[in-house]
């Protein structure tokens, strides 16, 4: 980032290449809409570019990057929730983006794989819905902890809370997931045992 | 260790992020507590289930869209950055500034001390000029000079000569 600050365009390209996939995935899991996730990820990179001259390396770059992403995602989730409340009760029921994405997946050609594919998709759907049901902040904490593998101090900075508050947040989130995914969890524990 | 304490460390234990001493304490508790042991297994299972979600790739147009957004950004005018790029110009500008400051200071020192600005010097100067001032007083109030007829005007002279003729 310091090279970007010095005006090195190639370094910005490097940042884009390195962080676009983790960012899009994080945002996709937060907002549950692929197009919106990409728009938000582009906005994150634009903000990074705009702030390059004022960038002070007081924290790790990833912490700063995911802080911007988390704030944008939380605002977007709140805006979406508000918009959903405004939708008429007579509006036709539509598939959510997640289901839409699932339908676009290629169906395996071989017959024995179809059943396996459907089982896997059903499991994934359950997991996604369990994550979706978490309150936004808990969801962000789980995604940063599980998929970005950031340490507690970094996640606490991103979510503007203390480390002990973050641990409590994560514990409650995993507890909710454990309850929500109880059948899958029991099956998993049985397989492990 | 109590079950509450274990609950606060359970995620760290599952992630392998506990310190060595904390990990040993947790394992000691788990060896004796079946409910906490089950919870650890369930948290591991949750973590394993989260791993099942596939990673999506950004669309092929993603980079191009970011580049377009960046290219549309207005260019900032930063004079300091410009000076950083041209150290010779920066050096010349600083030398010019120094020269201007030095000249201003030098000229200020060269300004003559005017006598009326300093009362002591003004008094001394007045004492030196006193004879001249006295002469001026005498001449301006000299009575015999006042009795003299006013000077003849140059325009009237030719008229007088014509009348005499």
Image: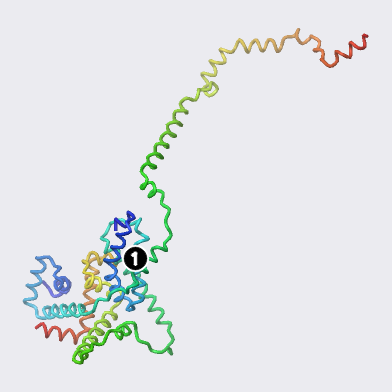
Q: Is residue B140 left or right of residue A177?
A: right
Estimate the x, y position of residue A27 in percent, counting from the top left. Answer: 31, 73
Position above or below: B124 against A192 = above
Q: Chain of mark 1?
A: A
Q: Is residue B131 visible?
A: yes
Position above or below: B121 against A141 = above
**Residue at 34% in and 62% down:** A48
Estimate the x, y position of residue B3 in percent, counting from the top left. Answer: 13, 75
Q: Quadrant of residue B146?
A: top right
**Residue at 86% in and 15% down:** B156
**Residue at 76% in and 7% down:** B144
Q: Residue furthest top?
A: B144
**Residue at 42% in and 88% down:** A91
Estimate the x, y position of residue B149 in percent, counting from the top left. Answer: 81, 10
Estimate the x, y position of residue B65 in percent, counting from the top left. Answer: 37, 69
Per the image, label 1 sits on a secondary structure element best described as helix
Q: Is residue A36 left or right of residue B114?
A: left
Label 1, residues with CA under 10 Å away: few <14, some 14-19, many ≥20 = many
Q: Is residue B165 left or right of residue A177?
A: right
Q: Quadrant of residue A154?
A: bottom left
The residue wearing badge 1 is A45
Nearest the viewer among B39 and B81 is B81
């Amino acid at each position: 980032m310091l090279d970007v600050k010095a005006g090195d365009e190639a370094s910005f390209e490097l940042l884009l290449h390195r962080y676009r996939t983790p960012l899009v995935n994080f945002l996709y899991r937060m907002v549950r809409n692929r197009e919106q996730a990409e728009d938000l990820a582009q906005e994150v990179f634009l903000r990074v570019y705009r702030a390059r001259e004022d960038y002070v390396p007081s924290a790790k770059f990833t912490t700063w990057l995911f802080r911007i992403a988390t704030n944008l995602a939380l605002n977007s989730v709140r805006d979406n929730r508000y918009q959903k409340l405004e939708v008429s009760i007579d509006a036709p029921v539509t598939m959510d983006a997640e289901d839409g994405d699932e339908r676009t997946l290629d169906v395996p050609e071989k017959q024995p794989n179809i059943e396996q594919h459907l089982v896997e998709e059903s499991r994934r759907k359950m997991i996604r819905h369990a994550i979706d049901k978490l309150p936004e902040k808990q969801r962000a904490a789980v995604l940063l902890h599980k998929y970005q593998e950031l340490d507690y101090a970094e996640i606490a900075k991103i979510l503007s809370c203390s480390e002990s508050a973050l641990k409590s947040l994560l514990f409650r989130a995993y507890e909710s997931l454990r309850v929500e995914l109880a059948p899958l969890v029991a099956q998993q524990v049985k397989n492990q045992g | 260790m109590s079950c509450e304490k274990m609950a606060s460390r359970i995620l760290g234990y599952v992630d392998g992020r506990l310190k060595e001493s904390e990990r040993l304490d947790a394992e000691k508790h788990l060896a004796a507590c079946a409910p906490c042991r089950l919870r650890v297994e369930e948290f591991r299972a949750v973590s394993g289930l989260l791993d099942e979600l596939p990673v999506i790739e950004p669309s092929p147009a993603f980079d191009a869209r970011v580049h377009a957004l960046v290219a549309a950004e207005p260019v900032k005018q930063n004079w300091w950055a410009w000076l950083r790029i041209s150290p010779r110009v920066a050096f010349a500008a600083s030398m010019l500034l120094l020269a201007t400051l030095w000249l201003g200071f030098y000229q200020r020192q060269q300004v003559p001390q005017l006598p009326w600005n300093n009362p002591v010097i003004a008094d001394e100067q007045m004492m030196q000029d006193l004879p001249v001032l006295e002469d001026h007083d005498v001449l301006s109030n000299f009575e015999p000079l006042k009795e003299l007829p006013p000077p003849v005007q140059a325009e009237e002279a030719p008229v007088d000569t014509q009348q005499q003729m």
